[in-house]
Amino acid sequence: PDDAAVEHFTVQAHRGLKVLDRRLDAVGWLTGVRMTLADVLALPVATSSIHLLPGDALADYPALRAWRDRMLERPMVVRGLAATKRPG
């Protein structure tokens, strides 16, 4: 892999996660006091970024971790994730 490209996209991923963490720390959900479609749409993007980063990427983002955990407790999110799982 191109080390410069990996470094660039690692920095960009952390930049985005910091923005999300600050917003979630301030209001709890992306658009305010309740979950909306914005949260549902942001979950796969945030989760993908987290999984692609080395180590425990959420360690530096406590509000993002709490949001992700709340999202994964929502029945509609659980059903949606189950419906998209590939067999095997």
Image (spheres, rainbow, N blue to C red):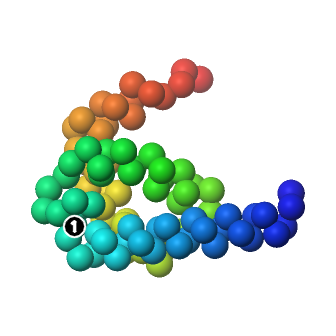
Residue 14 in percent (x, y) is at 55, 71
85 and 6: which is toward the camera? 6
SS under mark 1: loop
Residue 72's place in the image compared with 23, above or below, is above
Label 1 neighbourhood size at 10 Å, few (<14), some (14-19), many (20+)?
A: some
52 and 45: which is toward the camera? 45
Residue 84's place in the image compared with 27, above or below, is above
Identify the residue at the far left of this view.
33
Counting every numbered tag in the picture gives: 1
Q: Please say whether residue 54 is visible from this viewpoint.
A: no
Residue 58 in percent (x, y) is at 47, 69
Q: Residue at x 42, y 72 (%)?
A: 19
Looking at the rendered structure, the kind of residue marked 1 is Gly
Residue 73 in percent (x, y) is at 25, 48
Residue identifier under label 1: 28
Q: Residue at x 37, y 72 (%)?
A: 21
Say which quadrant the C terminus sits in: top right
Q: Quadrant of residue 18?
A: bottom left
> In this rendering, would 2 be left or right of 25?
right
Identify the residue at the far top of this view.
87
Q: Residue at x 47, y 68 (%)?
A: 17
Say which quadrant the N terminus sits in: bottom right
Q: Quadrant of residue 83?
A: top left
Residue 59's place in the image compared with 71, above or below, is below
Q: Please say whether residue 15 is visible from this viewpoint.
A: yes
Residue 2 in percent (x, y) is at 86, 61
Q: Residue at x 53, y 73 (%)?
A: 15
